[in-house]
Amino acid sequence: MPLVQKTLTLAAGATSDNILANTNYEFVDGNVRLRIASAVDTAGTTATVDTFLNVSVNNAEYSKDVSVPALVTGSPFGVLNGTYVNNDLLTTGSQRNRLLVRFTNDTAATRTIRCGIFIGG
């Protein structure tokens, strides 16, 4: 089962491109489990309410402006660590499903975001 992990540096006020754009996993079959985890480095602040995750499959939104949790020292990042799991879903389309995962940084500072997407299983 594939695992896609990325670290993004997102400028103040910016929205990322689709994390899976132009990869083999941008489109998945029906009845496929997707587990999406993310965390933001909030060095110098305790606020995470201004960094958001949006997840959609085809035209259905599964996460809309969900606050990304802070990366916690001593708690390793990963899709199996429930602290960071933002969405755990099963695709329902009978054929190809387009997965869109984007982040928005509404802060006045650049943020580093870690993202993991486990596909299948």
Image: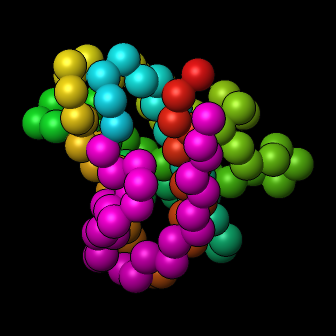
Q: Is the magenta stretch mostly helix, strand or loop?
A: loop
Residue displayed at 60% across by 56% down: 5
As drawn, 48 above or below 2: below
Q: Does 114 appear in magenta? A: no
Residue displayed at 40% across by 82% down: 11
Please tell me which residue lies in front, 111 or 61: 61
Quadrant location of the C terminus in the rendered image: top right
As drawn, 50 above or below 62: below
Q: Does 10 appear in magenta? A: yes
As drawn, 96 above or below 106: above
Residue displayed at 42% across by 24% down: 32
Q: Range of the magenta residues?
A: 1-27
Quarter of the image where one finds residue 97: top left
Camera sees residue 103:
no
In the rendered view, does 61 fall on the left or right side of 1? left
Quarter of the image where one finds residue 16: bottom left
In the rendered view, does 61 fall on the left or right side of 105? left
